[in-house]
Image: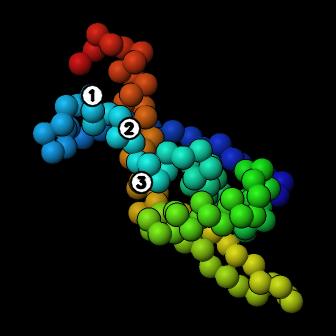
Amino acid sequence: MAGRQSAFQPAVGATPPLGPVDGRSPEADALELDRVIHERVRLGIVSSLAVNGSLAFTDLRDLLGITDGNLIAHARKLEDAGYVAGSKCQDGKSSKTEYRLTRLGRAALRAYLDHMEAIIDATRNPDRG
């Protein structure tokens, strides 16, 4: 597990989120973060995969400091959304699960980070806009 990183670098040149959806105000839209990614453990999973490319189940579990059951539940939610792909392979006598971020997952993480950066910018610079 040496050399594995859990932090991610924010997107460079982040853009603000898209305008209002379904006639909602920009303020209401700003609160609508991607709920699949926004949960702490799932954000940790996609961030770790974005930095490391792919991780074995045990490495990801240890990196995040969570239980097997917790990782299974959150990984399943991310797989159902199409953000993460898990693949099983034989590693000697035992099977090994490897997770990677999908193209859709990478785009969703980028959009999430852009959205968060826009909220942070609006909070730090309320006179702008």
> Dot 3: few (<14), some (14–19), or many (≥20) neighbours within 10 Å?
some
Mark 1 touches mark 3? (CB < 8 Å): no
For discs 1 and 3, the disc positioned in front in the rendered view: 1
Mark 1 touches mark 2? (CB < 8 Å): no
- Give me the residue at 27% from left, 28% from top: 27
* Quarter occupied by the N terminus: bottom right
Along the polypeptide, which appears first: circle 1 or circle 2?
1
Q: Is residue 92 above or below residue 81?
A: below
Give the amino acid type for the residue marked by disc 1 in the picture: Glu
- As drawn, is 80 to the left or to the right of 76? left
Q: Which residue is mark 1?
A: 27
Front residue of this view, candidates 31 and 109 = 31
Q: Which residue is mark 3?
A: 108
Q: Position of residue 102 (x, y in %)?
A: 49, 66
Q: Quadrant of residue 49?
A: bottom right
Q: Position of residue 115 (x, y in %)?
A: 38, 38
Q: Is residue 126 above or below residue 112?
A: above
Q: Is residue 22 above or below residue 72?
A: above
Give the amino acid type for the residue marked by disc 2 in the picture: His
* Mark linked to residue 115: 2
C-alpha span from label 1 to label 2: 12 Å
Mark 3 touches mark 2? (CB < 8 Å): no
Q: Quadrant of residue 22?
A: top left
Q: Residue furthest top?
A: 127
* Quarter occupied by the C terminus: top left
- Give me the residue at 70% from left, 76% from top: 97
Q: Position of residue 94 (x, y in %)?
A: 83, 85
- As drawn, is 2 to the left or to the right of 11? right
